[in-house]
Image (tube, rainbow, N blue to C red):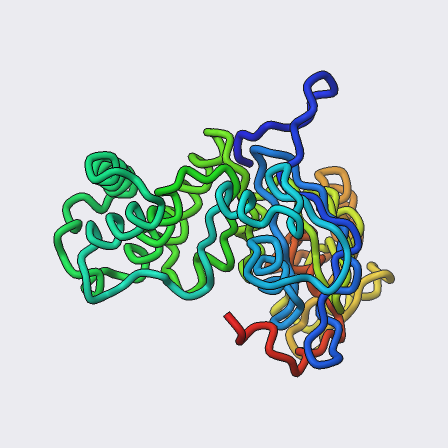
């Protein structure tokens, strides 16, 4: 977990983002149906949901790119509807699609952002150089961005977002399409930002990413928050832990099935699935029962509940809505 400004009971963190009853529809289709959020400053908040669930719409509303149909929201202490310019001055946004211009160099992309933030020529060059160095792009700074790898382009994308020194950053599926090494590098960058007090609002399709990074996670389904909490809190609300025993001998498989009445059998693979939390005590009791029956499994696998289980349980039967939520960017 990242180092963040959590509420220790004595010094509660200020709120970076808060919403109440946030609503948005496209063409009569409700995308956000009354969303309530409370995100402390200096933390990572992850919003999960199926494709088309409304994640990108939430980011677009909170970053002032799209107007909400109803509800209230405050970002960095500013009312979203009443003072959108102040909100824009406090945030940075990295969308699903790179804002990098491949026709110019990485350094030129950074300097363009510095100009947009009205930095002086000297100040812009200093900020650009510092960020390019920090993101491991100094050696490639003079090369066209079109020659960068996917991971380098995403790093440059986030570096450009940081030119204005935002205190809240919206990362909309920032690691989609990246290889595992590039994804882990991106996680390191997010942790460093949070350690400096930056708030990160993250949407992602990678549940491991949310598990690794987020202080709190919300699952969005059918326009509403289906559940919210820490990763461990969410895992506790969905049963799914089990032990899987696999056999190569059909006789041993049948003997074990007779001894373990609660097991779910899989005749085709000669496997048994036994509900449990995978604790040492439960495993010892299970092995004792197999020993008493004179049976030995060829393979034993322990599965504890993870965010995949939570996501599948909370979004079961979710349909991808036919609206432009994920295409109007």
How many labels sit on residues?
0
Q: Is residue 283 visible?
A: no
User: Which residue does the image show at 74% across and 20% down from the upper left?
Assistant: 9
In the rendered image, is residue 328 in sight? Answer: yes
Q: Position of residue 317 (x, y in %)?
A: 76, 75
Q: Nearer the viewer, residue 264 or 176?
A: 176
Name of the residue lying farthest toward the right: 261
Q: Nearer the viewer, residue 7 or 25?
A: 25
- Figure quadrant of the N terminus: top right
Place of residue 66 in the rendered image (x, y in percent of width and height, measured from the top left): 59, 63
Where's residue 291, x and y in %? 74, 50
Q: Name the image quarter holding residue 11.
A: top right
In the rendered image, the residue lying farthest to the top is: 10
Above or below: residue 216 compared with residue 225: above
Q: Nearer the viewer, residue 139 or 109?
A: 109
70 vs 286: above or below = below
Residue drawn at x 74%, y 51% is 72
Tell me: 207 left or right of 143. Answer: right
The image quarter containing residue 61 is bottom right
Q: Is residue 130 above or below residue 106?
A: above
Give the side of residue 112 with respect to residue 31, left or right. left
Q: Residue at x 41, y 66 (%)?
A: 97
Q: Image point 41% across, 37% down: which residue?
A: 165
Q: Which x, y percent locates residue 184?
A: 40, 48
């Amino acid at each position: 977990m990242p180092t963040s400004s959590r509420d220790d009971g004595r010094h509660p963190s200020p709120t970076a983002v808060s919403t109440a009853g946030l609503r948005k529809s496209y063409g009569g289709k409700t995308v956000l149906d009354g969303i309530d959020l409370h995100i402390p400053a200096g933390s990572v908040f992850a919003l999960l949901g199926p494709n088309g669930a409304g994640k990108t719409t939430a980011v677009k509303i909170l970053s002032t790119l799209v107007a909400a149909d109803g509800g209230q929201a405050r970002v960095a202490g500013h009312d979203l509807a009443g003072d959108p310019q102040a909100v824009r001055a406090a945030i940075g946004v990295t969308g699903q699609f790179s804002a990098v211009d491949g026709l110019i160099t990485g350094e030129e992309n950074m300097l363009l952002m510095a100009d947009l933030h009205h930095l002086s020529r000297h100040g812009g060059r200093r900020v650009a150089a510092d960020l390019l160095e920090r993101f491991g792009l100094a050696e490639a700074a003079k090369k066209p961005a079109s020659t960068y790898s996917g991971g380098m382009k995403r790093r440059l994308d986030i570096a450009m977002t940081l030119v204005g020194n935002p205190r809240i950053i919206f990362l909309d599926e920032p690691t989609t399409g990246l290889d595992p090494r590039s994804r882990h590098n991106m996680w390191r960058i997010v942790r460093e930002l949070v350690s400096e007090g930056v708030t990160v609002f993250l949407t992602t399709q990678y549940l491991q990413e949310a598990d690794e990074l987020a202080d709190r996670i919300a699952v969005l389904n059918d326009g509403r928050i289906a559940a919210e909490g820490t990763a461990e809190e969410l895992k506790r609300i969905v049963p799914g832990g089990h032990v899987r025993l696999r056999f190569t001998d059909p006789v041993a498989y049948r003997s074990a099935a007779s001894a373990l009445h609660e097991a779910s059998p899989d005749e085709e693979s000669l496997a048994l699935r036994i509900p449990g939390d995978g604790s040492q005590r439960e495993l010892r009791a299970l092995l004792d029962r197999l020993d008493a029956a004179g049976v030995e499994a060829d393979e034993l696998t322990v599965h504890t509940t993870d965010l995949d289980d939570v996501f599948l349980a909370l979004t079961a039967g979710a349909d991808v809505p036919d609206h432009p939520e994920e295409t109007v960017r």
